[in-house]
Image (cartoon, helix red, strand yellow):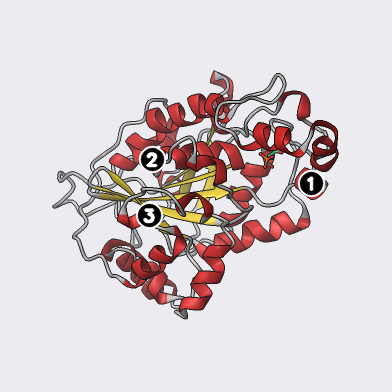
Amino acid sequence: MAATAFYQAIGTLQYSGCFSNSNLNQENGNSSYRLVSKVFNLDIAPLRSGTHCSRKRSFSVIQASTSQSTVFDPVSSPSNGSKSDSKKKPSEAALILIRHGESMWNEKNLFTGCVDVPLTKKGVEEAIEAGKRISNIPIDMIYTSALIRAQMTAMLAMTEHRRKKVPIILHDESEQARVWSQIFSEDTNKQCIPVITAWQLNERMYGELQGLNKQETAERFGKEKVHEWRRSYDIPPPNGESLEMCAQRAVAYFKENIEPQLQCGKNVMIAAHGNSLRSIIMYLDKLTSQEVISLELSTGIPMLYILKEGQFIRRGSPVAPTEAGVYAYTKRLAQYRQRLDEMFQS
Ligand SMILES: O=C(O)[C@@H](CO)OP(=O)(O)O
């Protein structure tokens, strides 16, 4: 892979500012550039298969299948190991974070928050492009917010995944919804990826700014004030949520529901929003409330983390599916890709 290509791709994350004066660990060190060197370093630590992970909620037949790793899958994801090592504790899982593609209110420069706005055509294209970038990375479970722009992004991205499993939204809003969305074929279940929607992953509620133009609001209230509302950690916009308040629900949800899946070896994708993901990244990267101020996420750019021996390691953004080096982040991911290559010969 040309290093410049990676620099360009990672640059679009606008993710460097927060590292320039941070005390992050070596993996996450000063800006994206340390990530670049990491891409070429093969991590050959042996991966163990996942133990069975119990889900808190019951999701009928699909749920059962997501926890059955003993069923033979010709391209099983790294979390689904062989019978012989199924008792060992998993030591690694992939976590993909994607901010939704451009929404129709991003395009109009309006504060959006919890208003449920769909993607633009550009946002659709960004989601598909994001899908190409993660098409060789195993995904066992998907979490999205309750908002359509995040759900569209997840679904569109999955149309590009080489494994061709079908993402299925698990409806558990009522007993009837659960019963009526059951699947009665175990074979079909094995080809599905459960998608869990959670309001806790929603964009932060922007209060009385929702629907206002960002530029006009800055002219009216002053640039500094609006920047404070948009990026400070603990100052909420009028009648809205601060990032701290958003973190209280989003990070709590992550810790309670998503992290246990990763610890069980499940590979997870989260499609969510600028601020709910900023709060989760703040937790993963151990950013301070000062550092998070300059953390900006672009629309539709996937970011990969590896959970390994209890630590989240940020691996940056996969560049393109054709770049072999990108998928050699770990031996386990490289093996997954190799199996896909062998199976689909593309
Ligand atoms: O309007 C919003 O909901 C968010 C994300 O688009 O905006 P900001 O970048 O100001 O947090």
Residue 308 spot, x, y in % from top left: 26, 49
| Res. 258 visible in picture | yes
Identified at 84% across, 38% down, the residue is 219
Q: Quadrant of residue 326?
A: bottom left
Q: What residue is pinned by disc 1? A: 104
Q: Quadrant of ligand 1?
A: top right
Asked whether the residues under the numbered discs 1 and 3 touch, taking CB atoms below 8 Å apart as contact, a structural biologist would say no
Circle 3: element type: helix
Residue 110 spot, x, y in % from top left: 80, 40
Disc number for residue 28: 3
Disc 1 residue lies near ligand 1 with CB under 8 A: no
Residue type, numbered disc 2 = Lys
Q: What is the crowding at mark 3: few (fewer than 14 residues within 10 Å), some, or many (at least 20)?
A: many
Work out whether mark 2 precedes mark 1 in sequence or the reverse, and give the earlier one. Answer: 1
Residue 13 spot, x, y in % from top left: 56, 57
Q: In front of the other: label 2 or label 1?
A: 2
Q: What is the crowding at mark 2: few (fewer than 14 residues within 10 Å), some, or many (at least 20)?
A: some
Circle 1: element type: helix
Residue type, numbered disc 3 = Asn
For residue 318, above or below residue 209: below
Residue type, numbered disc 1 = Met
* Apparent side of residue 310 relative to residue 238 in the rendered image (left or right): left
Disc number for residue 286: 2
For residue 173, above or below residue 192: above
Front residue of this view, candidates 157 and 326: 326
